[in-house]
Image (cartoon, helix red, strand yellow):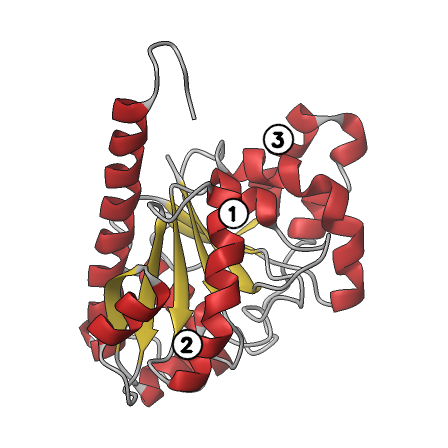
Amino acid sequence: MAVYALVSPGGSPGVTTTALATALTWPRPVVVAECDPSGGDIVAGLYAGHLRAPRGLLGVAFEAGRGAAAMAAEFSSQLVPLDDTGKRKFLAGITDPRQALGLSPVWPGIAVGLASIGADALADCGRLDAGASQPTSVLAEAAAVALVMRPTLRQVANARPRVDMVSQVLGGRDRLGLLLVGEGVLRASEISQSLDVRVIGSIPDDGSTARVLSDGVGRRTRLDRTPLLRAAQVAGLAMTKLGQTATSAELTAAPAGSAR
């Protein structure tokens, strides 16, 4: 199983909504992990505050003093069902951005735990900024990282330093792709050329479905038939393909006996 991360350049492009939509169409068991240092939204959003979730990410972090094995074992007890299939779950994030500094020393253990939970992990890392509280260890562990952004000049300007930051963590841009949300003044080819990153998919502005996922407003039935989830399914397949292609390239380029 693999870790896939989603990040934002800021400006509310819809990272959490995209992560949820992608998870609900993921073909294998999957966990959405709220790794956003500014705080998680799923309990207050999708569940409108009506779900009694465990401590989630903080519960895992509290086991750091007992070692990596204890942290990994704690993951299963902190997961909450995302739907009725039993194959899709989520790990609630922090509720107060002031808690993020306390996570700084345990991100490496969290990254290892996400890679060892027996399911793929979609890590919603939120807006990527500078600082020790950022989940860079999760990004480094990821098979692929998707930068979720809108096709506008403002978003491209915000994305440029984030592309450089992610590239530094990943050691290049082979595992990085762009997911474009909604319509804008720029074409996908223009954005790809400007940022020197491939566009791996696009997500439509589907307001009614987005409100279900972001705020729990509306019915959750037949979401798989909506434009948002159909596009998210294609985007998810593109993320896995990006990860597989990058891994194959790294294995081909690596000297015998070495590993990423």
Q: Quadrant of the N terminus?
A: top left
Regarding residue 90, the answer to whether it shows in the image is: no
Q: Nearer the viewer, residue 75 or 102?
A: 102
Residue 231 percent across, percent down from the top left? 22, 70
Name the mark on residue 73. Answer: 3
Judging by the rendered image, the residue that carries numbered circle 2 is 156
Locate residue 137, reporting x and y percent. 59, 42
| Residue that appears at 28% across and 67% down | 192
Q: Please name which of the two marks, 2 or 3, marks the residue nearer to the observer.
A: 2
Res 168 label: 1
Q: CA distance from mark 1 to mark 3?
A: 31 Å
Neighbourhood count class around disc 1 (C-alpha, 10 Å): few under 14, some 14–19, many 20 upward: few
What residue is shown at x 50% (from left), y 80% (from top)? Answer: 12
Label 2 crowd (10 A; few <14 / some 14-19 / many >=20) = many
- For the C terminus, give its image quadrant: top left
Residues 148 and 31: in front is 148
Give the class, few, some or many, for how many residues have Cα within 10 Å of label 3's Cα (few <14, many ≥20): some
* Location of residue 234 in the rendering, given as x and y in whole percent from the top left corner: 20, 61
Mark 1 vs mark 2, CA separation in Å:
18 Å
